[in-house]
Image (tube, coloured by chain):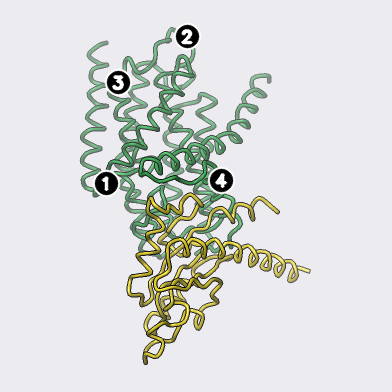
Amino acid sequence: MNDMVRNLIILVITILAAPVIGGLLSGIDRKITARMQNRYGPPVLQPFYDFFKLLGKERITVNQTQMMYVIGHLCFAVAALGMFVLKQDLLMLIFILAFSNISLIMGAMSVRSPYSKIGAQREIIQMMAYEPVLLFMVVGIYLTTGSFMIERLFSSALGYGKPLLYSLPLVFFAFIYVLTIKLRKSPFDFSTSHHGHQELIKGLTTEFSGPQLALIELTHWYELVLLLGLISLFFAKPLWVGILIALGCYFLELVIDNISARVTWKWMLKATWLIGIGASMANIIWLYMKK
Amino acid sequence: MGIISKARKKSPWIIHYDCTSCNGCDIETLACLTPLYDVERFGIINVGNPKHADILVVTGSVNKRNVRVLKNIYSQMPEPKAVVAVGACACTGGIFKECYNVLGGVENVLPVDVFVPGCCPRPEAIIDGIVLAMEKMQEKAGLLKKAANDTKD
């Protein structure tokens, strides 16, 4: 009973705190990006202004199901983050995260706009590129700790106290690589860009406006916190090192975002499968050899 | 003042439509986005999608061909929204006013909120126009809310 109350409190705090952290991080992202481009940049709270403004806009829906898909996108992402903070099954978490993304794709596919459809198809290609790498990451963690549970990483009682990075360096590299795709940063931002650039009108999010777009932005903040959390798993002990490294990786993503141009989907698919799957497979084979 | 109306003032997303401009005003409008003027510090973003936009920035005079496109873009934008006419042509039709195919300024077609005169206007004037449009948009949002409440009662 006591455990359940504790878990509930953790869950509520996460659901409330994650958007604040995610929003602040994207505000800092925009500020740093602007500084790198020699601009002054918007205030750090700008993502929150955008969010509340979008909430106050007129509700235009193209069809009745669209809002449901957006809510699905949000709820699955929140569920995945909830599973993460409660230290649940990592494999299930990756599947739920995929569900969240599929909801968005379905939402974009449910309208008749060709821009939205092309954006959705590109998102499917992106998922095709990064999902195998995420699965290999989970397999690698299983091979190291002997369990899919995240809890196992933190319990030294079970005889595992070393950071994951020592046994999974290449998997970590592959994960950082696919993080660029997940965060929709350049060079892999062709389904829709996270920044307010114009490409294919707005790709995946073309037909979402007002409150729907606000919810998609909110989901992005949850996802951002979850992904940075996954990075910190590799350095699980002590936790603050993991968080620092995760923030460092986020900064690295910003640098990559600003120094690279968008690539074509073919190039991305080839490169991600070759480098991402190649690196994580090599790591997993090495783990087998070591045993 | 609620949090939404506060946020609205700080995050105007503009969509820029070039009617039949000579590109002079367009270059000045896009110059606002460069590091020198950097309108993003006011939260202004140039979006390409009318469904995400708050402010429609029009350059050039309206003619019989592009009036359809202009009206289409305007009708796709969710309320509250504002229109800014940038440059002499967009304000009055400019030197093309008497042309057989020109309908005149944007005001003949859409409810324009802010006129930014000049041929072409300086980026500072355009930024000023957009800031004025934000205030107009705020007023409009208040009126919309009032209208919605009146119909409820």
**Residue to which mark 3 is pinned:** A169
B22 is higher (above) or lower (below) than A181: below
**Residue to which mark 4 is pinned:** A48
- Residue A274 is left or right of residue A193, and the answer is left
**Tag 3 and tag 4, C-beta contact below 8 Å:** no
State the separation of the CA atoms marked 1 and 4: 28 Å
Q: Nearer the viewer, residue A127 or A188?
A: A188
- Element at label 3: helix
**Tag 3 and tag 1, C-beta contact below 8 Å:** no
Task: Tell me residue A139's x, y (percent).
Answer: 34, 25
Q: How many numbered marks have been drawn onto this rendered protein structure?
A: 4
State the separation of the CA atoms marked 2 and 1: 44 Å
The answer as to whether the residues below labels 4 and 2 share one chain is yes
Residue A261, numbered label? 1
- Residue A220 is left or right of residue B1, and the answer is left
**Residue to which mark 2 is pinned:** A156
Amino acid of disc 1: Ala
